[in-house]
Image (tube, grey):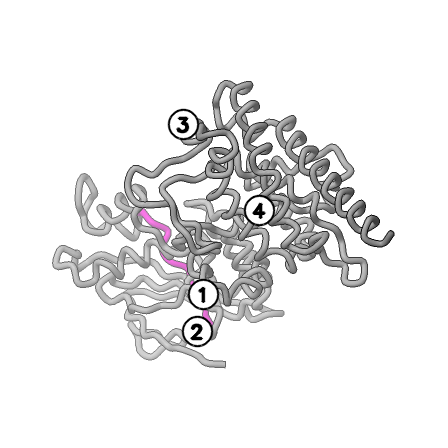
Amino acid sequence: MATRTFIFPCTYARRIPDPIFFKTEKIERHILMVPVKSVPTGLPYDPNARLPNTRRRVYREIEDSLLNRADNTANTFHLKHKGITLIADDVTRRSENEYAIKFRSGQGIVDGGHTYQLISDNLSNPDLPQNQHVKFEIITNIPEDWISEIAGGLNTSVQVEDMSLDHLAGRFDWIKTELKKEPYFSDLAWREGEEGEFDARDIISLMTCFLIDEFPNNGTEHPVIAYEKKSKALELFESHEASYLKIRPILKDILKLHDTIALEAREKWNKAMGGKAGHATFMEKRQRGKFKFVFIGKADERRLSNAALYPMLAAFRWMVEEDPSKSRYRWRGGFKAVQERWEQAAPEMMRLTFEQNNETGRTPNALGKSRAHWNNLHTKLAKLDQDAELIELRKLAAVNR
């Protein structure tokens, strides 16, 4: 396994054996007080649950402290901030004031990544004080499967989102594998700090709309949490991952359907009803540029808001069934049948959405949370699909006479 070694000049150093796990795991802590100007660059972020985002206000305040700006007492940075925690393979003393720290893959900064990024960004800053210090705490011999748990415990000063911890624990790996060859993969973010049109919570929420194990088509419950509170959808994913795994064969289709509905709903309604959708409160319009529909490779200045989109999308779980031979979900009649049902159902689904939006005070958020609306759309699509199947059966019977 490849390793990397970094040299840390330090003013003071201490080694502390772990009080519980030193005898069994040889876990140790090494405390180094390092001059900020001597902090090595390029330390790995592998075990850190979130990527640094130093644009937040709290980090501007930390930078003021680092640079002795505003009302900060000079050179007190190491007293005000808890420092940077690393998980490493080995710490070796090279001289009285210098240590070599070796990292294996998966090791590196586990806490304090934002502090480290701010320091790195200012190393060439002529205003960086000569006598500023930062504390490094290096933990060695941590078992690999403990790292995500430790990351969650240490990151408390700025709460790490569950999404980031799930990413660190590898929960999203099978989703990433399924989507990694798609042209939109670079538009997806999997942990805090990453940029993307959608993040892992969005993907999980869209999958939740089709989770027939928890929201069966013959039941009375609907996956409103997919819109109402994505954190609840993520909790459901964490506790019912086996059910979500069943969605894998139709996941790409779900994403395509999401964008198709978001893009085409206004046009379908206008064509059927003579053009009224543009002024609806549940339609969003870009003043500059266009919305990106990354899952179908298109763009437009208008789109359906999530408040209207999610209930429509979730109605199509009527078209999902479990393949008994593979314990996986599949579309009844294939994805082509789903697309056909959208073409047929779009005007009526938009009509129901207009009516419900008016009943809820033309407030999109209330529309998205309306259990009655989710049920009405699901019921309408079910009836339309059953009627279409009945027509096909009659045609087939006529041919066979």
The disc label shown at residue 206, or none: 4
What residue span does the magenta drawing correspond to? 80-88
Asked if residue 390 lies left or right of residue 56, the reply is right
Mark nearest the camera among 1 and 3 is: 3
**Disc 2 + disc 1, Cβ < 8 Å:** yes
Given the current orientation, which residue lies at the most extreme left position?
126
Residue drawn 17% across and 41% down?
A: 70
**Disc 4 + disc 3, Cβ < 8 Å:** no
Q: Dot 1 corresponds to which residue?
A: 46
Mark nearest the camera among 1 and 4 is: 4
Q: Dot 2 corresponds to which residue?
A: 103
Comes first in the chain, label 4 or label 3: 4
- Image coordinates for residue 106, horizontal then vertical, percent: 49, 69
The kind of residue tagged 4 is: Leu
**Disc 4 + disc 2, Cβ < 8 Å:** no
- Label 2 crowd bin: few (<14), some (14–19), many (20+), radius 10 Å: many
Residue drawn 55% across and 41% down?
A: 230
Q: Dot 3 corresponds to which residue?
A: 279
Is residue 303 placed above or below 108 in the rendered structure?
Answer: above
Q: What is the CA distance from the residue labelled 4 to the residue labelled 2?
A: 38 Å
The kind of residue tagged 3 is: His
- Label 1 crowd bin: few (<14), some (14–19), many (20+), radius 10 Å: some
Q: Nearer the viewer, residue 76 or 290?
A: 290
Q: What is the CA distance from the residue labelled 4 to the residue labelled 3?
A: 26 Å
Mark nearest the camera among 4 and 3 is: 3
- Image coordinates for residue 392, horizontal then vertical, percent: 75, 47
